[in-house]
Image (tube, helix red, strand yellow):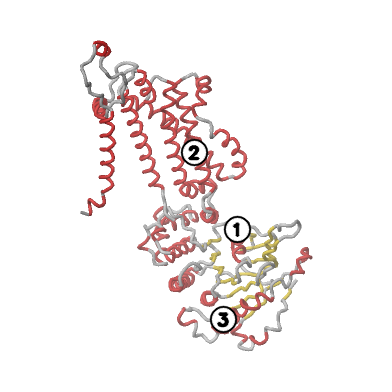
Amino acid sequence: MNKNYYVKVENLAKRFPGESKGKDLTVFENCNFGIEKGEFVCIIGHSGCGKSTILNILAGLDQATDGYIFMNDKEVSGPSLERGVVFQNYSLLPWLTTLKNVTFGVRARFPQWSKERVIEHSMKFLELVGLKDSAHRKPSELSGGMRQRVSIARAFATQPNLLLLDEPFGALDALTRGMIQEELIKIWEETKQTVFMITHDVDEAILLADRVLLMTNGPYARVAESVTVSIPRPRERSSVIHHPGFYQIRNHLVDFLVSRSKELSGAIQSDSNIQSFTPSIAPKEVDPIAEGMDVQSQEVGTQEQVISA
Amino acid sequence: MNYIAAHRHILISLLFLLCTLGIWEWGSQPPEATKAMSEYELLMGGVDQEARVPPPSAIIERAFDELSDPFYDAGPNDKGIGIQLAYSLYRVLMGFFLAALIAIPIGFVIGMFPIMHKALNPYIQILKPISPLAWMPLALFIIKDSEASAIFVIFICSIWPMLINTAFGVADVRKDWINVARTHELSNLRTAFTVILPAAAPTILTGMRISIGIAWLVIVAAEMLVGGTGIGYYVWNEWNNLDLTSVIFSILMIGLVGMLLDLMLSSVSRWVQYKE
């Protein structure tokens, strides 16, 4: 990985001690990828491949067994306000009002700010997610979609250098999900934040992401492909599906999830025996639109990895 | 009609009360003399040799009497019910708040650090089932002051429910909320005050309610032993005076004050309650 990414993940691995001695359970290993500044990256993979663990390690809430993460050339160790997290279950503090949940984050991020400035800043972000009128309601009085909006407002309001979204719309119905996706694009375009997001939804990934990382199935999962979504922005839910490249990307992603995620899983298991000089296995870079329709027929035969030691 | 429907339970309550009092009143009337008393009977003060539980009417009368001047003080053995209750309340609140002062911080530590839980749990398990009154002789010997010993007994009995509930509430705070604190780089102290305390507050308050209930139960017994002042002493003193009317009246007052104590804490606990 020669490219100078803003966030660099190198040879990341997570293993749990197995039941019998010496036999560790490897969730994923040899994960290598990068995120550029201002880029929106989604990661897709089946349950159990360790996406959430990767996100938690990025957030500093979990520790990797092997490998490193660098952000802005500094190693990531432990949680930091530089990296904001939106959790799947919203994680709002139920005893605080909507506004206080946002000011909670803002005050921690900018302790030197005056009270008025904190409130003004927080209200601005609540307004961005359309919840200005619910500022003084408690989370229990809000619907799931509204709660997730508050959570997004809190994360964006702290203006982190990297925003981590753990399946933020997983628990929402399709209509609400669509609306918040568009709000998310709007805020992202306004703030130009770097975003790393987990999703299960292929359409969501295409709508939001600049690049989609694909993980193989666990155990011994890894990031196998990095798919560029070169559909021009601004994108909208209604128009993005009419872009000529939409189905090329969609088919590529679905095909990966349905068949290749299984075929590729555990493919480089043997490398873990020689950990002292594990090669950096970069994900295969794919741009379905640029490659055109013929990519579909080719890739059955091309499963070899791009190795750059 | 709706108003009556919504308040039917009050009617049933009142009916129940009236029935109980009625039966009680009727049952505690002395039997009427059927024939003229013999000389011996006249000398002994009537046919009825049996002492009777006083009827409710006598108790109501006594209550009216006592409550019209609850704070009179006519020497060590004759004080108004208000003064006696105030002594007991003072001891209970003193012991209770001292216990809270110790139990809540220790509970926090036990809840936050599993190693402390493992280290201290054996002691808690041994000390918790000891009847608070069993401490009394030791307290009297060490403290050498009956007043302070009574407070100590309240302290030792109210500490356990608060300690255990605080530890449980703190240990049980949702991981997500702790993660929110961690991703916002809050210090341990700020996390404790801004996230863990509000999250565990309802559980802690439940512990406090249990504690004050137990403290109020124990103070009566403790004051019977220690003597001097307080509602427990009052009950025992009236028993020695064979004044059962006052005994029953003070039993009712103990119940009433205990209920008020619980109501007070339950209103505080409503205030810290949150809905997820």
Q: CA distance from mark 2 to mark 3?
A: 59 Å
Q: Are marks 1 and 2 in contact (CB under 8 Å)?
A: no
Q: Name the quadrant of the C terminus of chain A.
A: bottom right
Per the image, the residue denoted by label 2 is B161
Please give the residue where the numbered disc 3 appears in the rendered image.
Answer: A250
Distance from the alpha carbon under mark 1 to that under mark 2: 36 Å
Residue B233 drawn at (x, y percent):
38, 22
The amino acid type, in three-letter code, at marker 3 is Arg
Compared to A265, does A249 lie above or below? below
Give the quadrant of residue A116: bottom left
Q: Please determine whether, in this image, residue A210 is positioned above or below residue B76.
A: below
A66 displayed left or right of B1: right
Q: Could you tell whether A42 is left or right of B239 in the image? A: right
SS state under label 2: helix
Hey, what amino acid is under mark 2?
Pro
Look at discs 2 and 3 and give the one toward the viewer: 2
- Circle on res. A60: 1
Judge whether B77 appears above or below B22 on screen: above
